[in-house]
Amino acid sequence: MKRDGIDLGRRGFLTGRRLSRPVAIRPPWSREALVTAACMGCGACVPVCPQSIIALDAEGRPALAFEAGECTFCGACAEVCPEPVFDRSVAAFPHVAAIGADCFARRGIVCQSCGDACPETAIRFRPRLGGPALPEIASGRCSGCGACIAACPAQAVVVSVRMPEAARG
């Protein structure tokens, strides 16, 4: 159904609709507005990432590929960037992990890969009767590093916008 960014479904094909691009996850300490305004697409951040999770997106701007691994917050990308793209005074990521509907545990299959991979121990498992324990993410502890995303065999872990402290209360 997808090819070259064109929606080949009946309605999309007949109307010439293009598929919407997924929102890119930017490197730590960078925000979409800063990347759009200041990044020149030099790619200096790509080879210095020790985890090899930074790649240039279709616009030539840095984006993270958490499927390849996790961010260790080493700061190499921020140090090598010649433009004011990174702001180390803000939280590293504006997102936290979220468990999607494709989670094996939600479908009755025992799996705790995300919890085992989480360096912040932000993922706990709530026991339930008649099925495997369900993962729950403590958003206050989640650093947004992506370790759980890379570890999930069902690709059920996604990123979600971090709620402000006042809204959680």
Image: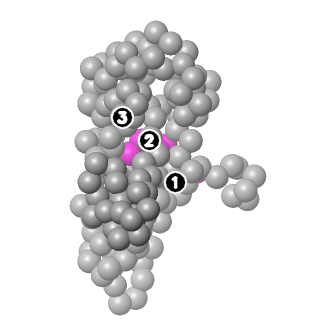
Query: Between residues 8 and 40, which one lies in front from this camera angle?
Result: 8
Dividing the image into 4 quarters, which one contains the N terminus?
bottom left
Q: Of the residues shown, which amino acid type is indicated by label 3? A: Ala
Residue placed under numbered mark 3 in the picture: 58
Residue depicted at x 53% and y 46%: 95
Where residue 4 sits in the image (x, y, percent)? 28, 48
Residue depicted at x 32% and y 40%: 65
Q: Earlier in the sequence, mark 3 or mark 1?
A: 3
Q: Of the residues shown, which amino acid type is indicated by label 2? A: Ala
Q: Which residues are drawn in magenta?
A: 140-146
Residue 107: quadrant of the picture: bottom left
Q: Earlier in the sequence, mark 3 or mark 2?
A: 2
Circle 3 — which element? loop
Relative height, residue 43 to residue 54 (above, below)? above
Q: Residue 145: say if magenta.
A: yes
Residue placed under numbered mark 2 in the picture: 24
Q: Earlier in the sequence, mark 2 or mark 1?
A: 2
Q: Of the residues shown, which amino acid type is indicated by label 1? A: Ser
Mark 1: few/some/many CA within 10 Å (<14, 14-19, 20+)? some
Single out the mark in the foreground, 3 or 2: 3
Calculate the distance from the C-alpha at mark 3 to the C-alpha at mark 2: 10 Å
Single out the mark in the foreground, 3 or 1: 3
Dividing the image into 4 quarters, which one contains the C terminus?
bottom right
Disc 3 + disc 1, Cβ < 8 Å = no
The dot on residue 84 is none
